[in-house]
Image (tube, grey):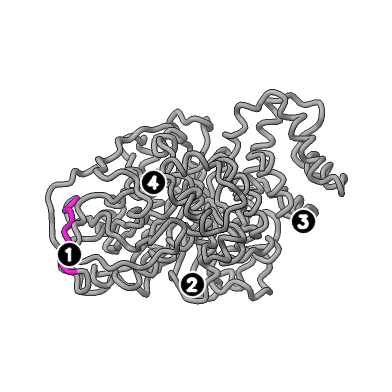
């Protein structure tokens, strides 16, 4: 990484003198700019206009369990040093963003990408070194297609998701991570032109939980971005649930925190708000599900809606001009890592779980098990691998294809598969492409640790994404809906030019048999069955 060398000041027409960092030759960074305020715990974000901000240091991340950055890097087999963060995590100051831009004034507004990190809405921050945007902006300048990058923080864990019927009636209906992300887009629309960006030319780039949130943004009538790249995540895999489900969690929360259920809601809120944020987060994570949104401000539709181009239910299908949906070959390991300690006896346990989940239709249970070879007499090691394949195919791969099939104009949607081998000693995948490895390829902050082949693919991959941000489309038109006939871009060592190839789903090493399965077994029911086995919910 190029060292930060000096401070710089940028005069913004609305924000005044913004002090930032000249981070590399031709690239400036403005860090920790506050984009919204939070008046009290659980409240909605309100846009904030900083005046003469000092943007030379990263802003506080959202409260979260420690070690998240190291864990994510360890997942792909690497380590990086966290930058010095003078501020500790802060519940009320975490809504800040970083802007990385060319130093040069080009005389015309530049395309903008807004980066939303993943982490299960539990961990993540825009200060994590693997997400530094300098190299991506440097590459855009070298290509002659300069861009501006915006990386945001949003609320995590129970500080984001906690709500109930009584809280919603009080005006606190949760979904704060989603609301924070929307506020960051609103801020970008309002202020990015002052940094030289084009508010009418924004591309959303998001991964995992961040991609799920951004796919929810497509529900808005107002356009938030012009294009989107969603890596390994879309709304149906973590759908919002009714407030009645939140009520069950809320009851457990009160029990965990030893707060009486008999208190009026104002007194309950007073007690909830009195607990320090770090203590609140750590105590409640075991009893609050991941990415737990509700259906009051974010609607839930079954997968059959997303896969049906005839249904006019998602406004973003109209205003998001081009959509790229991407997966890694072994995305499912981000979920099956929760099963590592349960390998012994996993075949019998999984078979019993499937049979129970589809007890009203045992023929469907048999179909799920037989389609993936989960016979009663196979050993646990074999079963574990097959369960991993099933989870990968349902919760990551198939969702992208089905989501893509639902676009009325298939020329506006594109599929990417990442099959680049992670040669580092990752925690859960050997000789494969784990979840989040695509981010190492995109941001290139681990380039010095890549071999020449991987570094070449990484640069080509990033160049194509930058081309997309600039309005060019380097990807083939999606073709469907026949099984195996979709036209995908595959980044792989097998590529004809050493980096990528255009292939059918079968050629991309994707198990298209999953579509035969989800045609007979409702996708939502199958996804719920798998996730409840993994997370015990």
How far separated are the C-alphas under marks 2 and 3?
Answer: 29 Å
- In this view, the residue in front, 345 or 520, is 345
Label 2: which secondary element: loop
Which residue carries the number 3 mark?
519
Q: Is residue 59 magenta?
A: no
Nearer to us of marks 1 and 2 is 1
Distance, label 1 to label 3, CA atoms, is 57 Å
Label 4 sits on residue: 458
- Which numbered tag is attached to residue 52? 1
Of tags 1 and 3, the one toward the viewer is 1
Q: Earlier in the sequence, mark 4 or mark 1?
A: 1
Q: Position of residue 507 (x, y in %)?
A: 61, 48
Q: Residue at x 47, y 31 (%)?
A: 426
Say which of 345 and 328 sits in front.
345
Q: Residue at x 62, y 57 (%)?
A: 239
State which tag comes first along the sequence, 2 or 4.
2
Q: Nearer the viewer, residue 468 or 382?
A: 382
Q: Could you tell me if residue 443 is visible in this image?
A: no
Q: Is residue 280 left or right of residue 2?
A: right
Task: Of the two numbered discs 1 and 3 on the same chain, state the one appearing first in sequence.
Answer: 1
Query: Label 4: how many residues lie within 10 Å, few (<14), some (14-19) or many (20+)?
Result: many
Q: Where are the magenta residues, as a range?
A: 16-23
Q: As displayed, is residue 374 above or below residue 314?
A: above
Residue 321's mark?
2
Circles 2 and 3, Cβ within 8 Å, touching? The answer is: no
């Amino acid at each position: 990484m190029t060292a930060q060398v000096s401070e710089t000041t940028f005069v913004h027409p609305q924000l005044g003198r913004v002090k930032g960092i000249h981070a590399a030759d031709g690239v400036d960074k403005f860090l920790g700019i506050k984009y919204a305020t939070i008046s009290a715990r659980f409240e909605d974000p309100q846009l904030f206009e900083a005046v003469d901000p000092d943007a030379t240091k990263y802003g506080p991340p959202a409260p979260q369990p420690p070690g998240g950055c190291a864990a994510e890097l360890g997942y792909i087999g690497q380590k990086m040093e966290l930058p010095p963060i003078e501020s500790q995590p802060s519940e009320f100051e975490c809504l800040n963003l970083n802007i990385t831009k060319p130093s040069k004034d080009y005389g015309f507004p530049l395309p903008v990408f807004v980066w939303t990190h993943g982490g299960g809405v539990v961990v993540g921050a825009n200060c994590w070194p693997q997400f530094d945007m300098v190299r991506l902006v440097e590459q855009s300048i070298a290509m002659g297609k300069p861009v501006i990058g915006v990386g945001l923080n949003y609320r995590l864990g129970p500080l984001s998701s906690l709500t109930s019927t009584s809280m919603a009636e009080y005006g606190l209906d949760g979904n704060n991570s989603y609301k924070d992300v929307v506020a960051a887009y609103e801020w970008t629309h309002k202020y990015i032109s002052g940094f030289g960006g084009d508010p009418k030319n924004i591309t959303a780039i998001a991964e995992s939980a961040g991609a799920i949130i951004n796919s929810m943004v497509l529900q808005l009538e107002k356009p938030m971005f012009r294009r989107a790249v969603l890596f390994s995540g879309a709304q149906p895999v973590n759908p919002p649930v009714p407030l009645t489900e939140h009520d069950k969690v809320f009851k457990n929360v009160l029990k965990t925190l030893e707060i009486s259920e008999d208190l009026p809601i104002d007194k309950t809120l007073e007690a909830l708000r009195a607990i320090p944020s770090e203590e609140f987060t750590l105590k409640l994570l075991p009893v609050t599900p991941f990415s737990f949104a509700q259906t009051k401000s974010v609607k839930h539709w079954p997968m059959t809606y997303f896969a049906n181009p005839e249904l006019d239910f998602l406004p973003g299908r109209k205003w998001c001009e081009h959509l790229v949906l991407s997966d890694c070959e072994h995305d499912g390991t981000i979920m099956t890592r929760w099963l590592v300690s349960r390998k012994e006896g996993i075949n019998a346990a999984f078979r019993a779980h499937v049979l129970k989940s589809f007890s009203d239709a045992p023929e469907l249970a048999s179909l799920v098990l037989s389609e993936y070879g989960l016979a009663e007499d196979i050993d646990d090691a074999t079963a574990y691998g097959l369960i991993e394949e099933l989870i990968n195919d349902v919760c990551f791969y198939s969702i992208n294809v089905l989501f893509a099939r639902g676009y009325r104009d298939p020329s506006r949607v594109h599929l990417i598969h990442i099959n680049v081998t992670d040669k580092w000693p990752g925690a859960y995948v050997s000789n494969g492409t784990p979840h989040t490895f695509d981010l190492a390829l995109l941001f290139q902050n681990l380039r010095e640790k890549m071999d020449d082949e991987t570094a070449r693919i990484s640069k080509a991959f990033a160049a194509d994404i930058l081309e997309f941000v600039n309005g060019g489309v380097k990807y083939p038109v999606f073709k469907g809906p026949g099984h195996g006939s979709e036209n995908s871009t595959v980044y792989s060592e097998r590529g004809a030019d050493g980096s990528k190839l255009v292939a059918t789903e079968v050629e991309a090493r994707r198990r298209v048999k999953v579509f035969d399965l989800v045609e007979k077994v409702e996708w939502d029911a199958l996804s719920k069955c798998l996730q409840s086995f993994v997370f015990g919910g």
